[in-house]
Image (cartoon, rainbow, N blue to C red):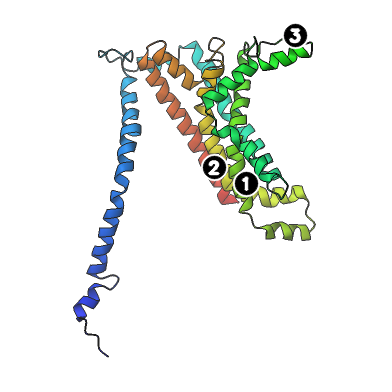
Amino acid sequence: MPSSQPHSVRRSNAPGKPGFVRRYFQSASALNLMYVPALIFFGVFIFYPLIKGFQISFTNWDGYSPKYSWVGFEKYERMFHDKKILTTFKNTLIYGLGSTLLQNLLGLAYALFLDRKIRGLGIARTIVYLPVIISPLIMGYIFYFIFQYDGGALNDLVAVLGKEQVDWLSSGPRAVWIITLINTYQYMGIAMIIYLGGLQSISKEFYEAAQIEGAGWLSQFRNITWPLLAPAITVNIVLNIIGGLKLFDVIVALTNGGPGYASQSLSTMMYNLYFARQDAGYAAALGNVMFLVISIISLFILYTLRRRELRM
């Protein structure tokens, strides 16, 4: 029976016709409007401070005075003559690379151990992940009361054992590695969760087939688990390297960059330059260099690991 609807109306509602196209663009425009609040927040809190910081790095502004003057590249040239910069860069790399290595090794070990049916599995996962929800500043103060010389919990234990007390935080290199271990302890739970997600996405059929072929645990890990965990490895390493390179809170709480400048990172040095020494121009220049260093290292690692995923 012929439809009573006019032929022209039926055609306008068909995909690929003017009516369909008009509705498509109307819905797309409405969807694009949803991006506007996010773009505004990004512009106000990310893009504008970035541009402003770049501008301040070419001035001698003290961070408070309404007056300042342009000094060109003087603040950047100053970095090449600042004796503290080399130590600060070395510490930052240790915090970043050391934490990344340890977090991934321990996170993967915990994930492999907890990816099985054992009693108390949920409690064990919670205990490993629990430090993540603690503020890094609070975590730093907790360990400060453990490692401090007078009345520290660790020295109290040493005294009970009849040994001489140790000033754990008086040595710069030792303080750097203590901070690295604390950062590892706090955030290895995130690595564990990501690796657990990766492990649980691997089909058990692969392991069953490998067992039929007589492959042992190590062979299964090398040929099945490790290649199929490539996306999780990429995510973990990139997140860990970014977090480690901009480490700040734990350092402030535990040593405040001391003794002297021996445990300082780029973040804490930038903080001290701005608030303690009122040298906002130099702090901004250091912040720009820090942003560049983190971006280059993170993008290089991301590119390298993505290529590894494609090869696998």
Q: Is residue 296 above or below residue 67?
A: below
Mark 1: few/some/many CA within 10 Å (<14, 14-19, 20+): many
Query: At 60% across and 35% down in the image, what residue appears?
Result: 130
The span from disc 3 to disc 2 (Cα, nearest Å) is: 44 Å
Mark 1: amino acid: Leu
Q: The residue tagged with tag 3: helix, strand or loop?
A: loop
Quadrant for the N terminus in the image: bottom left
Instruction: Residue 62: give x, y in percent of width and height.
Output: 33, 12
Image quadrant of residue 255?
top right
Image quadrant of residue 142?
top right
Q: The residue tagged with tag 2: helix, strand or loop?
A: helix
Q: Which residue is more in the foreground, 185 or 177?
A: 185
Q: Is residue 23 above or below residue 125?
A: below
**In the image: residue 208, left or right of residue 58:** right
Q: Is residue 155 above or below residue 134?
A: above
**In the image: residue 214, left or right of residue 106:** right
Label 3 vs label 2, nearer the camera: 3
**In the image: residue 235, left or right of residue 121:** left
Tell me the number on the disc at residue 196. 1
Circle nearer the N terminus (1, 2): 1
Return the residue at label 2. Answer: 235
Instruction: Residue 285: give x, y in percent of width and height.
Output: 39, 20
The span from disc 1 to disc 2 (Cα, nearest Å) is: 13 Å
Return the residue at label 3. Answer: 164
Mark 3: amino acid: Glu
Mark 2: few/some/many CA within 10 Å (<14, 14-19, 20+): some
Label 1 vs label 2, nearer the camera: 1
Instruction: Residue 290: give x, y in percent of width and height.
Output: 45, 25
Circle nearer the N terminus (3, 2): 3
On the question of residue 229 being in view, the answer is no
